Image: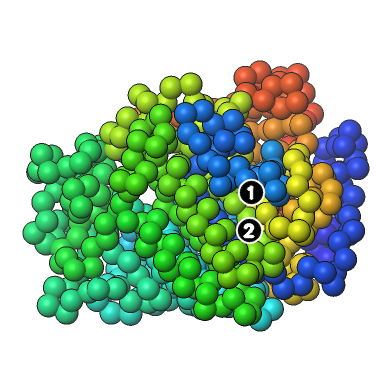
Amino acid sequence: MKKILLLIGLFSLVSCGENSETTKKTSNLPKTIYKTPNVIILYVDDLGYADVGVYGAKGVKTPNIDSMARGGIRFTDAHSSAATCTPSRYSLLTGNYAFRNNAEILPGDAPLLIDTNMNTMPKMFQKAGYTTGVIGKWHLGLGYGQVDWNKPVKPGPAEVGFDYSFLLPATGDRVPTVFLENDKVINLSEDDPITVSYDKKVGQRPLGTERPDLLKMKADLQHSQTIVNEISRIGYMGGGKSAEWIDEEFPYVFNSKAEKFIRNNKKKPFFLFYSFHDIHVPRVPHANFTGKSEMGARGDAIVQVDYVVGEINRILKEQGIAKNTLIIFTSDNGPVLDDGYADKAKELLGKHNPSGPFRGGKYSIYEAGTRVPTIAYWPDNIEPRVSDALLTQLDFFASFAEMLGIEMGETVIDSESHLDALFGKTDFGRQFLLEEGFTKAIRDGKWKYIQPFQNGQIPDWMANKEIEPGLKPEPQLFNLSEDKGEQKNLADKFPEKVKAYQKMINSIVTLEK
C-alpha cells in the first residue's frame, strides 16, 4: 500500500494529464490461462537497439531473431534498467533499481552483489514449482570476495534461487578465464591450482604489455594483463591451465548446457536465464561465423547470437514444448564499438548505426543507453504485433509473479506488473520510468528529463569510448515525440517540468512523497 500511495503522489508531481489513459491498470488477461509456461530470458550483452534486422540493422542478417519478432511482440520503447551490465542484471533479478545497492560494474573478484536474504526472480519461480537455471555470463559477484577458485565458490547462483548454473564467472575480458558449473570450476587439476589477483602479477602467463606479439588483437592498457587464448585480459591469473576456456567455443558450450537443461526439465515447468557473452568484448566469433557479416568481428558476433537463438527454438520444437514456452529476447544495455580491443568495430561499421535514431549507447544516460531490442515470443499464445508500450526489465519480476499468482515479497520495491503490455493486450505500459547511467533520468511519455551531473569531471576512460555519456552540469529536457535524437534541450522553456521531474527522481530515491 505504501508503494501505491508513493506512485500516486509521484504522478501528481507532473502535469501528466496529456496521457492520463496510460495510468489505467488493465487486467484483461484470464488468470487461469497463463499459469505455468516455461520461461526463457535470452539476455544478450551490449546489443544496440538497431543491431537486429527488424530494428533496422544494416550489414548483418538476423533471420532467427527476426522470425521471433514477426511471430511475437516487438517492442519499440522497452528498456534495460541501466546503461551498464551489472546494474541491469541486478535490477532484472531483484526487481529493484540498482542504485539501492550501489550496484556498479563489478571487478572480477567482487563478492556476491545480491543479498541472499532477498527475494529474487528465480526464488519466485521456485515457489511456483519451477526448476531454475542460469547459463552464461554472470558478473554479479561470487563468494565473499577474494575467492579461492580451487574450492566450492559460495554464495553464488544457488543461494539466490538457481537450481542449476553454468557460468562465465565475471566477463570474457576478466580473469579467471574458466567455467564454473554450480559452485565448482570444471576441468581443474589439483596439480595446477588457480591463483587470481587484480593487484599484482601471479603465475607464469605472459602479459599483454610484455608480449604483444602473442595477441590476436591489440588491447588498451586496462585489458593488457594476463594473456589467455592469445587475448590479454583485465587482471592476473596463474595456474588452471586445464580449466581454461576457449572464447570461440562459447556459443556451442553454452548451447550444449542449455539443451541438456531443457531436455532434463521438459516434463515440468522451468525458468532459464540464458545470459550471452556476445556481443561483449573480446569479440572472437567461432570460425563458423567469421565473415558472415559486413562489419567484422562485431557483426559476426551478432550472427553468432542469431544462431544461438535459432538453436534454442529448434530444441524447444524438437522436444515438443515450444508452444508452452515464453521467450523474452533482449539486451542488458545499449551498444558500444570500441570497448578496449582493436577489433575494427568502428572502422567496419559501414552504414550501420547500432543505436538507430537514438543518441548515446552503453554507459550513456541518453536514450540509446537503455532502449534495447525486446521481443516477447510465445507461439499460439500471444498474437504478433508491434507495441509502443513503455517497458523496463525491472518489471519482468512483478509481471511474472502476477502470471503465476505468487507474491513478490517485501524486498521487491520497484517492480511493477505490466503483464497485459508484455503479452500485447494493451499498448499502455509504465507511466514513467527511471533510467540509470552515471546519473539518472526520467521517462514520462514523450518527455525525457536528465538530472545534472554533479560528480565532477567525466572519467577519461569514458571519453575514450567515443560515446556521449550525457553528463552535463545543467538539467536536460527533451520532447522525444519531436526529437528522438535528444538534440534540443528544452529545460529553459519548461522550468516547472524540470523542477517536478527532479522532485520525482528524489522521491523515487528516498521512497518519500
Considering only order in the chain, which callout, 1 or 2, is on the residue closer to the N terminus? 1
Given contact means CB atoms under 8 Å apart, are the residues at marks 2 and 1 in contact?
Answer: yes
Classify residue 388 as left or right of residue 233: right
State the SS at label 2. Answer: strand
Which disc is residue 512 wearing? Answer: none
| Residue found 37% across the figure and 26% down from its top | 348
Q: Amino acid at mark 2?
A: Ile
State the SS at label 1. Answer: helix
Tally the numbered discs: 2
Q: Amino acid at mark 1?
A: Met
Classify residue 32 as left or right of residue 249: right
* Residue on which disc 2 sits: 327
* Residue on which disc 1 sits: 68
Q: Compared to 449, does 289 lie above or below?
A: below
Distance (Cα) linking label 2 and label 1: 9 Å
What x and y, as percent, mark residue 408? 71, 71
Q: Compared to 508, does 264 lie above or below?
A: below
What x and y, as percent, mark residue 389? 76, 43
Residue 501 appears in view:
yes
What x and y, as percent, mark residue 111? 39, 67
Give the crowd class for mark 1: few <14, some 14-19, many >=20 residues within 10 Å. Answer: many
